[in-house]
Image: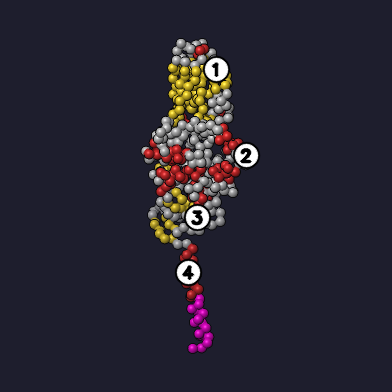
Amino acid sequence: MSLWVRLALVGGMLFGAALFVYALQSGAEERPVDVEETPEKVVVAYDAPPAKPGVLDSSDNCKECHAEIYEEWSGDRHAKAWVGELYTELSNNHTDPNCWSCHAPRPILETGLDSPAEARGEDRESGIDCLSCHRQGNHVVGPSKTHGPVAGRNPDCGPVFDPNFSRSGAQEETAKFCGVCHNLHGTCDEFMGSQYARDGDTCLSCHMEETMAPAVTGGPAKARGKHAWPGAHSERMLKRAMKFEASVDGDTLHGRIINKGAGHKIPTDARHRAIYLRVAFVDRFGQPIQITGVDPISRKEVTDRELSMDVVRLFYRQEQRPSTQIPPKGTLGQNNWRDSTFPIPREAKGGKVRLKLIYHLKWSWPMHRGVLVQEMELEIPD
């Protein structure tokens, strides 16, 4: 065999080997492992692909496929966690680093559910965004059992099913998930010790209400959790959580503030929140009466036409005062109400007493900035 023939054979073998290696490498880049064809769509399940530049770096990545959910989130307090008026004020215009980790957290599935949240260094204006709760590496973790993208959609989010995201998911894990931020003052521990937890409820039972709406843009309406978490900023939720009762006994007015529907203490978590029971008297002719009492915040004697009969708060440490928060129903060894009294002035005999239950997002704001949760008027016998 001539030298040229031998060289041609060797060259052909090397070229064939190169093609074989290239084919193996190309197949490793994208491996559809299952294909299901239907008249409506083609569903392709992929092995989790690597992230690409620009993918999973903001909530805007999620908007294409989850427009309805994105709109729910963007109107919620989570989306405004960094830019909200109250947070801006309390954080001294965003300069307090103690606040950053919960108002602009890194993905908590990456930093861990058994440790406090960690602040991210960019895009803090998005607050608690989609990625804060759903991103884990190259994956978007959620309740969907579809392990892979739908054909025609972005293949780079790598959806992964986790039963703890479903409404019937593990109760303790749900509390831990929320507790990364909301258990700094024991809110989730309060819930786990309540009757609601023993009855099988979760944090989502109240704070992620069920709705009939598409989970994927253009998809069918289905029962799912609404991505809006009503709480202390919702008047409807405040009225669901608390109420008061009052009675007149001789020269004494009795009041009782009741935690009737919150699965945690009221107020919970934030020390700047407060609940006031306000009282005012009028005489038999309907004229307001000046009354004197001890203000429950300053603990100084004050005189006015309307005073605070009681305040419910988790006080700041420097105030060195025990909490007056009211536990949830079923907390072992504790009542889910708080009693207080106020002396009835002699001038009010034959008149009336007017009471108001007012919730404050910040205890030091003027009273008119609070939310009127309930009011009542009682007659005072002669």
Check disc 2 and report the residue beneath it.
93
Q: Which residues are magenta?
A: 1-15
Mark 4 in CB contact with mark 2 (< 8 angstroms):
no
SS for callout 2: loop
Instruction: Give the image location of residue 292, x and y in percent.
Output: 55, 18
Residue 3 included in the magenta stretch of the image: yes
Instruction: Give the image location of residue 263, x and y in percent.
Output: 43, 36
Q: Amino acid at mark 2?
A: Asn
Which circle, 4 or 1, is nearer the viewer?
A: 1
Q: Amino acid at mark 1?
A: Ile
Q: First in sequence: mark 3 or mark 4? A: 4
SS for callout 4: helix
The CA span between labels 4 and 2 is: 57 Å
Q: First in sequence: mark 1 or mark 2? A: 2
Left of 245 or right of it: where is 369? right
Q: How many residues crowd mark 3 within 10 Å: few (<14), some (14–19), many (20+)?
A: some
